[in-house]
Image (tube, grey):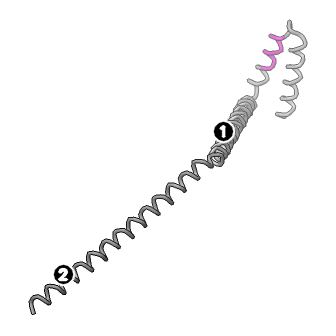
């Protein structure tokens, strides 16, 4: 029944589009048909709302896909930029090796100084022990 009314209304819409003078009469006929069956009017509103929701969801999905693609492009661009910055990476590794070598040299010099001081203290202790005997 509803399908028949919908087909009827769509055919009236086609006739109304073809004949502009008779559009007001056809519109009144359509409104009267909708008012005759309140559930039909509710179904039309529900279908229109569903179509609008579907369109909104499609637009949201498309916008989300566009944002995701832009994020992927930005991530790829950053990765390429980092990969091209080889000079900075090499300089950072060189700086770390220089710092590590300087630290090892500092520790070696400190240890040599401590060994010399221990040797001097031993000699002083032995000399003090000989003098006290």
Q: Pointer 2: what residue? A: 124
Most foreground residue, 84 or 114:
114
- Does residue 107 sit above or below 50 in this rendering? below
> Is 28 included in the stretch rendered in magenta?
yes
Magenta region: which residues?
23-30
Total of numbered circles in the picture?
Answer: 2
Is residue 57 found left or right of 8 in the rendered image? left
Q: Could you say where residue 105 lies in the image, as x and y percent from the top left?
A: 42, 66
Q: Residue at x 57, y 48 (%)?
A: 88
Query: What label does residue 10 carry, if any?
Result: none
- Does residue 17 sit above or below 94 in this rendering? above
Is residue 131 found left or right of 89 in the rendered image? left
Please identify the quadrant where the C terminus is shown: bottom left
- Residue furthest bottom as drawn: 133
Could you tell me how far apart the alpha carbons at marks 2 and 1 are, in whole angstroms? 79 Å
Most foreground residue, 37 or 100:
100
**Where is residue 31, by image quadrant?**
top right
Q: Residue at x 85, y 34 (%)?
A: 3
Label the magenta part by its dominant secondary structure: helix
Q: Could you say where residue 91 lies in the image, as x and y percent from the top left?
A: 55, 51
Q: Could you say where residue 29 lies in the image, as x and y percent from the top left?
A: 81, 17
> Is 120 included in the stretch rendered in magenta?
no
- Does residue 2 sit above or below 72 in this rendering? above
Most foreground residue, 29 or 11:
11
Q: Earlier in the sequence, mark 2 or mark 1?
A: 1
Q: Pointer 1: what residue? A: 67
Q: Residue at x 50, y 54 (%)?
A: 95
Most foreground residue, 16 or 126:
126
Instruction: Check disc 2 and report its element: helix, strand or loop.
Output: helix
Q: Could you say where residue 9 lies in the image, as x and y percent from the top left?
A: 84, 24
Instruction: Check disc 1 and report its element: helix, strand or loop.
Output: helix
Is residue 113 found left or right of 121 in the rendered image? right
């Amino acid at each position: 029944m509803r399908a028949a009314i919908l087909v009827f209304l769509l055919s009236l819409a086609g006739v109304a589009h073809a004949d502009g003078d008779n559009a007001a009469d056809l519109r009144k006929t359509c409104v009267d048909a909708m008012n005759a069956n309140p559930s039909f009017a509710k179904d039309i509103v529900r279908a229109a709302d569903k179509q609008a929701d579907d369109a909104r969801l499609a637009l949201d999905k498309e916008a989300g896909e566009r944002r995701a693609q832009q994020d992927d492009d930005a991530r790829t661009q950053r990765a390429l930029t980092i990969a091209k910055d080889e000079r900075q990476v090499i300089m950072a590794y060189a700086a770390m090796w220089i710092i590590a070598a300087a630290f090892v040299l500092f520790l070696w010099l400190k240890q040599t100084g401590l060994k010399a001081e221990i040797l001097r203290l031993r000699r002083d202790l032995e000399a003090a022990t000989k003098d006290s005997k």
